[in-house]
Structure formats: structure tokens, C-alpha cells
Image: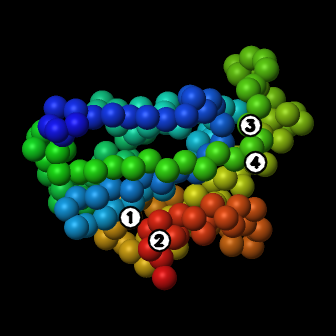
Amino acid sequence: MGNQKNYSCIEFSGLALHPTFSIYLFEIEKGKEKFFYVGMTGDGHYPSARSILHRLAGHIDLGKKSTQSQFMKGLKDKVFKGKKNLTAEDWETLHIKLHQWPIPGFEPWEGDLKNLKKESAPYQKYKATQTEVLNLEKRLIEALKEKYPEKILNEKRGKANLKSENKYPSIYNDIKDIVGYE
């Protein structure tokens, strides 16, 4: 493809459309600089987990009142040093990769969410896995922000529970390797 200005290609496995728990990493290059954003799928209030592409759509939501667009806020604040309105020329300077690690355990919710019983066994099973995934995300953000505060776009999400077991050490190590954590 000769003219990169007029061409983009996004290719993904069909599983990127499947709702699941996952940890993901945006890897953003701007010239010789690299920035990163860590995220997860799996809602803390309702038993749902979005596909990675559905989650991506929320991250790039441009609505002024969006609560999902922390990634876009991080791009504007850290990558573009507080610039409010990005131009085509600004966007052109970025190359972005989205890495995803699906985590088993999500099952679509059967039943009415309006009458959700949080003490029920199915909800408790959902919440146990969601809490493990959330703790992995918090561990990663905490470790990466401590070492590379200027490169990590995430806002703090609260302290990780370091007393609990990290059930996903390979994901943790994969992300640290991609970031170049030493």
C-alpha cells in the first residue's frame, strides 16, 4: 500500500467480537516515544463483559460526558501535552497496537438485570472472576505507573490487593515485557 495517508487496515480474529473477561494493553508510538494504557473487560456492577472491540468503541467515544474515554483523555493529556482539539495531522503521528489476553470464566447472564440478586451463586461466581481480573489490572497499572509515570496513560484505580494471589502471572509478565519493564 503506497499511500499510508489514505489507507488503514484493521484485522482481527472473530473472537475479538466475543464478550469475555480480558486484560488489554494499548501500545502507542509517537515518533520515538512510546506510551501505554492498561484496561480490562468485566463490569464491577452488573454481570457483563464486553468484547474487546466493544470496549475499544467506548474508549474512543468523543462525547463530552463519556465516562469510558479515559484512554482518549490520556492521549490528549500525556501524548499531546494537554492539547484539547486534535487534528488529522496529530492523529497521523500515532501508531497504535491493541493487545488482548482473554480470561476464561465469563458466562452470559441469564435473567433480568433489574432484579439482580447479588447474593445469588451465579452472581458471586461472576464477581469472583471479575475481582481477580480487576486486581490484575490494578497491579499492572500500579507497577507501571511507579516505574514509568510519564508513559502510562491510566489514571490511578486504587490500590491492588497484593495479599491476594496473582492468578494470571503470564499475562502480567507479557505486559511488562511489551512495556520494557526491567
User: 71 left or right of 131?
Assistant: left
Q: Where is residue 154 drawn, in percent x and y?
A: 41, 58
Tell which circle, 1 or 2, labels the residue nearer the N-terminal end.
2
Q: Could you say whether the residue bearing mark 3 is in a helix, strand or loop?
A: loop
Vertical relation: 148 (above or below) 110: below
- Find disc 3 in the rendering and name its residue: 106
Query: Marks 4 and 2, Cα distance to the nearest angstrom?
Result: 23 Å
Q: Are marks 3 and 1 in contact (CB under 8 Å)?
A: no
Badge 1 crowding class, 10 Å Cα cut-off, few under 14, some 14 to 19, many 20 or more, is: many
User: 38 left or right of 35?
Assistant: right
- Amino acid at dot 1: Ile
Query: Marks 4 and 1, Cα distance to the nearest angstrom?
Result: 25 Å
Tell which circle, 4 or 1, labels the residue nearer the N-terminal end.
4
**Residue 129, label in figure:** 4
Tell which circle, 3 or 1, labels the residue nearer the N-terminal end.
3
Q: Where is residue 172 drawn, in percent x and y?
A: 61, 65
- Find disc 1 in the rendering and name its residue: 152
Query: Marks 2 and 3, Cα distance to the nearest angstrom?
Result: 27 Å
User: What is the total number of numbered labels drawn onto the structure image?
Assistant: 4
**Residue 144, label in figure:** 2
Badge 3 crowding class, 10 Å Cα cut-off, few under 14, some 14 to 19, many 20 or more, is: many
Q: Are marks 2 and 3 in contact (CB under 8 Å)?
A: no
Task: Give the residue displayed 18% in from the left and 56% down from the top.
Answer: 80
Tell which circle, 2 or 3, labels the residue nearer the N-terminal end.
3
Vertical relation: 81 (above or below) 83: below
Query: Marks 1 and 2, Cα distance to the nearest angstrom?
Result: 7 Å
Q: Could you say whether the residue bearing mark 4 is in a helix, strand or loop?
A: helix
Q: Are marks 4 and 3 in contact (CB under 8 Å)?
A: yes
